[in-house]
Image: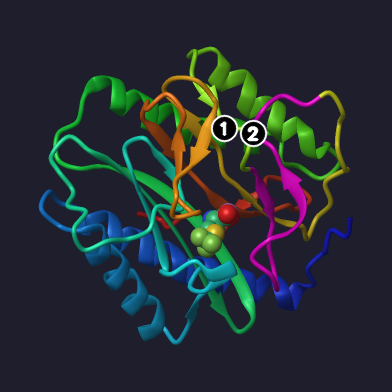
Amino acid sequence: MVVSIKSAREIELMRESCRLLSQVHDALGKAIRPGMSTLDIDKLGDKMIRDMGCVPNFKDYHGYPASICVSVNDEVVHGIPNKSRILQEGDIVSLDAGLIYHGYHSDAARTHAVGKISAEAEKLIAVTKQSFFEGIKMAKAGNHLYDISNAIAAYVTGFGYGIVRDLVGHGIGTSLHEDPQIPNFAQRRRGIRLQPGMTLAIEPMINMGGYEVKWLDDDWTVVTADGSLSAHYENTILITEGEPEILTLSKE
Ligand code: MF3
Ligand code: CO
């Protein structure tokens, strides 16, 4: 396993890549409304990324056919945008997006409400987001990687939700997926020691029901095995000497 430590120059490029991605997420979040297709979201995101002079890193990644992963309700991640998949009032929709700026990758995900949603769905989205923040409280130089995993798991488990195990967070930099893998469920070991200059994508995927997932026949879309709702929240972060920097979070 090789965990890259970014130089000051590389950190500047990561910051800019992530700042641009945060703008894409802000715009997509504002655009969500009932009646739009999941392909409309992909087109909007793809255009915005290219207009920034960047490259969407998901497009053609191991054959993935779009720039934005759009996952509705029981779809956990990697939903494929489709012009006939229309968002309905009451749906929840997870948007996962990433881009490349001067060779440096960013990656972030948000789950949004489509119009008015149930209180249960609101809570799932809020807990998933908060679990990321609980996790990164531990994301400090000198701590161990799985301190993050264990903090996410300890928080989420209290709500009785299922933590997806088959997909994990990851290092990120000149590739979308670098070492190390970052599970969101409890670990027996401590994992590697965190060092300043590591850039990590922390991304809890949380199901209202059981943790089990399955893949649809399109070989991409991951859905909950029991059909329950699922939420996703992800940011690219930088380990520093002090508090972690959340690189894909805008001031909005
Ligand atoms: N954010 C996703 C991840 O880290 C990337 C989507 S993979 C793609 O796994 F193939 F859909 F691009
Ligand atoms: Co990711």
Q: Position of residue 110 (x, y in %)?
A: 40, 47
Q: Which residue is drawn at the image coordinates 15% and 57% (left, top)?
A: 36
> Does 202 sit left or right of 226 as displayed?
right
Which residue reaches farthest front?
217
Give whichever of 84, 32 is nearer the camera: 84
Residue 248's x, y, as percent?
Answer: 51, 58
Q: Is residue 179 left or right of residue 176?
A: right
* Label 2 environment density (alpha carbons within 10 Å; few <14, some 14–19, many ≥20): many
Tag 1's secondary structure? Answer: loop
Ligand 2 found in image quarter? bottom right
Query: Which is more toward the observer, 29 or 82?
Result: 82
Left or right of 250? Residue 202 is: right
For label 1, the residue is 164
Range of the magenta residues?
168-187
Amino acid found under the numbered disc labelled 1: Val
Look at the image and say whether residue 186 sits in the magenta stretch: yes
**Residue ID at (53%, 70%):** 63
Q: Where is residue 43 shown, x and y percent of the image?
A: 28, 72
Mark nearest the camera among 2 and 1 is 1
- Give the quarter of the figure containing the N terminus: bottom right
* Element marked by disc 2: loop
Magenta span includes 43: no
One can see residue 251 in this view: yes
Sooner in the amino-acid sequence: mark 2 or mark 1: 1
Mark 2 lies on residue? 184
Q: Are marks 2 and 1 in contact (CB under 8 Å)?
A: yes
